[in-house]
């Protein structure tokens, strides 16, 4: 479903992504892990049409996101770190707007909205303004919305950041249900190693722009001789504190604005 071959991205003399290759199968949950500034955001931006690679090749469901941007965008959904819901609209209206932007037919849109709001335990609050929701409810709504147009791939960029353990567990249970029922490929980033260990079928670890490990959580722990994925991650990437690149959040916000305008 996702094929990345010898991917490179340079900004002047700085190489942010350095000869990265990996595949993600249809219906797989793939966790892409790395310290701040390791190259995760740059890779996601290339996968989701925001950045053009310096060299290398990407395929999303058989499409080249560099030359077939609009067709590729129709095949995937994305949930950003930063909130993207309209707080003055209801849960139903946020779903409705997303469906219209993706040209989901009216009947299918209403049926799909009800199914997802029920699955993500938001049906009883469908008529409430989103600004009245808790943080966990908002994230569940954002992910439900990401599934609305039945994408082939869903990108989740740290979707559980700031949520309590109960909310994180509940959210991943819902995502796994849709993943298993509809065979939607899920590509996620997270700094919570415990949830990556529990949720992901396979994991890729990137550091200093290079892919330093990939495989099942069990295989990575065996490879590093550790008992937990967090220990394996630290052994692969070191324990030094990293600073996130200064413009990464601004770039993702810029992407959100560009994405919204492109869908209109």
Image (cartoon, rainbow, N blue to C red):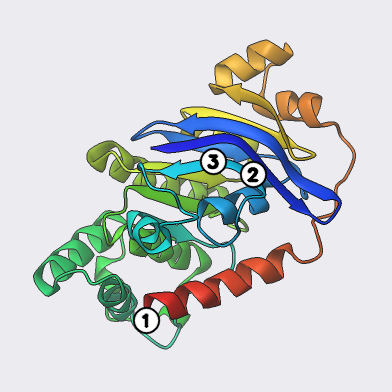
Q: Which residue is mark 1?
A: 264
Q: Callout 2: 10 Å neighbours few (<14), some, many (20+)?
A: some
Disc marking residue 57: 3
Q: Is residue 264 left or right of residue 187?
A: left
Q: Which residue is mark 2?
A: 55
In the rendered structure, are the residues bearing label 1 and label 2 in contact, judged by CB atoms less than 8 Å apart?
Answer: no
> Which callout, 3 or 1, points at the residue further toward the start of the chain?
3
* Residue furthest out toward the bottom: 88
Q: Residue at x 44, y 82 (%)?
A: 86
Q: Is residue 84 left or right of residue 190?
A: left
Frontmost of labels 1 and 2 is 2
Q: Quadrant of the C terminus?
A: bottom left
Q: Is residue 254 left or right of residue 65?
A: right
The CA distance from mark 3 to mark 1 is 28 Å
The CA distance from mark 1 to mark 2 is 30 Å
- Secondary structure state at the residue bearing disc 2: strand
Q: Residue at x 86, y 51 (%)?
A: 13
The CA distance from mark 2 to mark 3 is 7 Å
Q: Quadrant of the N terminus?
A: top left
Question: Which x, y percent locates residue 210?
Answer: 73, 34
Question: Which x, y percent locates residue 26?
Answer: 34, 34
In the foreground, 118 or 210: 210
Question: Which x, y percent locates residue 155?
Answer: 47, 51
In the rendered structure, are the residues bearing label 2 and label 3 in contact, judged by CB atoms less than 8 Å apart?
Answer: no
Q: Residue at x 54, y 41 (%)?
A: 57
- Secondary structure state at the residue bearing disc 3: strand
> Which callout, 1 or 2, points at the residue further toward the start of the chain?
2
Q: Residue at x 20, y 69 (%)?
A: 104
* Residue furthest out toward the left: 107
């Amino acid at each position: 479903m996702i094929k990345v071959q010898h991917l490179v991205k340079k900004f002047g003399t700085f190489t942010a992504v350095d000869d990265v290759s990996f595949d993600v199968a249809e219906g797989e949950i793939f966790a892409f892990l790395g310290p701040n500034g390791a190259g995760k955001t740059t890779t996601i931006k290339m996968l989701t049409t925001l950045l053009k690679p310096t060299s290398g090749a990407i395929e999303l469901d058989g499409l080249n996101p560099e030359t077939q941007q609009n067709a590729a965008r129709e095949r995937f959904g994305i949930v950003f770190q930063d909130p993207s819901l309209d707080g003055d609209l209801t849960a139903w209206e946020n779903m409705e707007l997303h469906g219209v932007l993706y040209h989901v037919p009216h009947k299918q849109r209403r049926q799909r909205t009800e199914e997802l709001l029920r699955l993500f335990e938001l049906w009883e609050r469908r008529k409430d303004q989103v600004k009245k929701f808790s943080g966990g409810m908002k994230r569940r709504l954002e992910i439900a919305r990401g599934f609305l147009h039945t994408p082939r791939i869903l990108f989740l960029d740290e979707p559980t950041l700031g949520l309590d353990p109960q909310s994180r567990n509940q959210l991943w249970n819902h995502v796994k249900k849709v993943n298993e029922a509809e065979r939607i490929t899920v590509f996620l980033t997270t700094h919570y190693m415990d949830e990556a260990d529990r949720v992901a079928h396979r994991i890729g670890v990137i550091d200093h722009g290079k892919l330093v490990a990939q495989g099942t959580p069990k295989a990575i722990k065996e490879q590093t001789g550790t008992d937990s994925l967090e220990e394996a991650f630290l052994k692969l990437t070191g324990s030094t504190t990293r600073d996130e690149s200064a413009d990464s959040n601004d770039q993702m916000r810029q992407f959100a604005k560009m994405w919204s305008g492109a869908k209109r």
